[in-house]
Image (cartoon, helix red, strand yellow):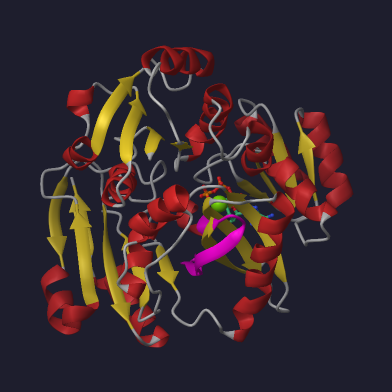
Amino acid sequence: MNVLFFSPGFPSEMPLFVRGLAEVGARVIGLGDQPAGALPEVARRALTHYVQVGSLFDEAGVVRDVQRQLRGHHIDRVESVWEPGMLLAARLREALGVPGMTVEETRPFRDKTLMKEVLQRAGLRTPHHARATTGGECRQAAERIGYPLIVKPVAGAGSADTYRIDGPADLESVLPRIRHVAEVSVEEFIDGEEFTFDTICHDGRIAYFNVSWYRPRPLLQRTLEWVSPQTVALRRVEAEHLAPGIELGVKSLEALGFRTGFTHMEWFLKEDGEAVFGEIGARPPGARSVELMNYSCDIDVFRGWAEAVCYKRFSQQVRRLYNTAIIFKRAQGTGRIQRIDGIASLHHRFGPHIVGAELLPIGAPRRDWQQTLLSDGWVFVRHPDLETTLRIADAVGTDLQMYAG
Ligand SMILES: Nc1ncnc2c1ncn2[C@@H]1O[C@H](COP(=O)(O)OP(=O)(O)OP(=O)(O)O)[C@@H](O)[C@H]1O
Ligand SMILES: [Mg+2]
């Protein structure tokens, strides 16, 4: 089983997927723009070969280089678990004659308007929306859909250039700020809590799934710096209030014809119990969410994914033992980390329920919290009981403080 893997060294979770592939017995050929020597150790050890290209975003160039450098090698799979590589991976499959998602099948996962159109045709509940490329089209769409609204890039990620708009004056103030975005989606604002529905499928069957809860809503996580955002992988996925979202997820995958790999859907739960589709990616969630899944069930989901894409099976037994939360920390102040307060007392209070922490060390420069949800570090906590998990997670939010200067 020879797997060509897109960008094995970056972002930071990619090496864990590469390792998963190697552990299930695949030979992994990396495709990246970093020099081989700059790859993280975990990735380097798991790769059997590496193709370095000039730029991963020059698609025609990559296809040409890969075809030239891999002449004579047989490739069984081309995998990308990073959003910017999805279409390129599909192009490479087509160019190399490898099975898996085609460009046509990938497109609705990359284009948020197209995605919603496919789901609407299947009768699934999506926010009312319109595509707009000019200020005039945005105004027209706003008139038709009504306020409050969300405006966001059609090919967005990380909530970049995403705005809530409460009236025409708001719209006028946002339009100049999104002038650099080629195409936006103007959408009905859905009020409610936000959850994920994540799956690993093979041959159109869901072999594993996870539901996480975002606290608070991602748009707030991304606008309020003082917030310590949480993602909570839920243990009781059979809870009644989650059922409409899970059903929406299952039907969305059917409508999109998804067959094999990881998927990550986000959905809204309105106060009246209705589930509304948010977005879906044909890839795993980022921001250490796969590790969150590992902690919840004491399994290795990286390896589970690898097994599913290589051999069309998921052999690990899934028992949901814990609710697991990851809490992202943002230091106060700017510059370099000067002081970290509270971690010792949290360990003392919650002992074994704090299962991992990776905080920037003293002296390290702060990360840009608007660019990366990972911010200045994170803590994993878990407990069989949800209320207790939330209490511990909130204590990490308030009692662990980082200071920069
Ligand atoms: N129609 C909507 N109604 C209410 N909130 C919305 C809507 N669309 C987007 N949002 C808010 O904006 C956030 C980002 O939107 P979305 O998930 O579509 O974009 P994204 O840039 O891919 O985000 P990310 O990569 O962070 O998941 C959502 O999680 C949600 O909080
Ligand atoms: Mg999103």
Quadrant location of the C terminus?
A: top left
Q: Position of residue 310 (x, y in %)?
A: 43, 48
Q: Is residue 361 left or right of residue 200?
A: left
Q: Is residue 138 above or below residue 231?
A: above
At 15% across and 65% down in the image, what residue appears?
341
Q: Residue at x 40, y 54 (%)?
A: 307
Task: Please state the horizontal and vertical placement of residue 172, each as a whole percent of the image.
Answer: 72, 37
Q: Is residue 258 above or below residue 341?
A: above
Write the start and end of the magenta stretch as one range. Answer: 202-219
Q: Is residue 211 magenta?
A: yes
Q: Position of residue 126 (x, y in %)?
A: 75, 57
Q: Is residue 351 visible?
A: yes
Say which residue appears at 27% left-offset and 27% top-offset: 49
Q: Quadrant of residue 203?
A: bottom right
Q: Nearer the viewer, residue 33 or 148?
A: 33
| Location of residue 85 with respect to 293 vertically, above or below | above
**Front residue of this view, candidates 21 and 87:** 21
The chief SS type of the magenta part is: strand
Q: Quadrant of the N terminus?
A: top left
Q: Residue furthest right?
A: 144
**Residue 217 visible to an observer of this rendering:** no
The location of residue 249, given as percent across then percent down, is: 64, 64
Judge from the rendering whether residue 193 lies leftward or rightward of residue 175; answer left or right: left
Is residue 358 magenta-colored? Answer: no
Q: Nearer the viewer, residue 72 or 147?
A: 72
Q: Residue at x 33, y 30 (%)?
A: 30
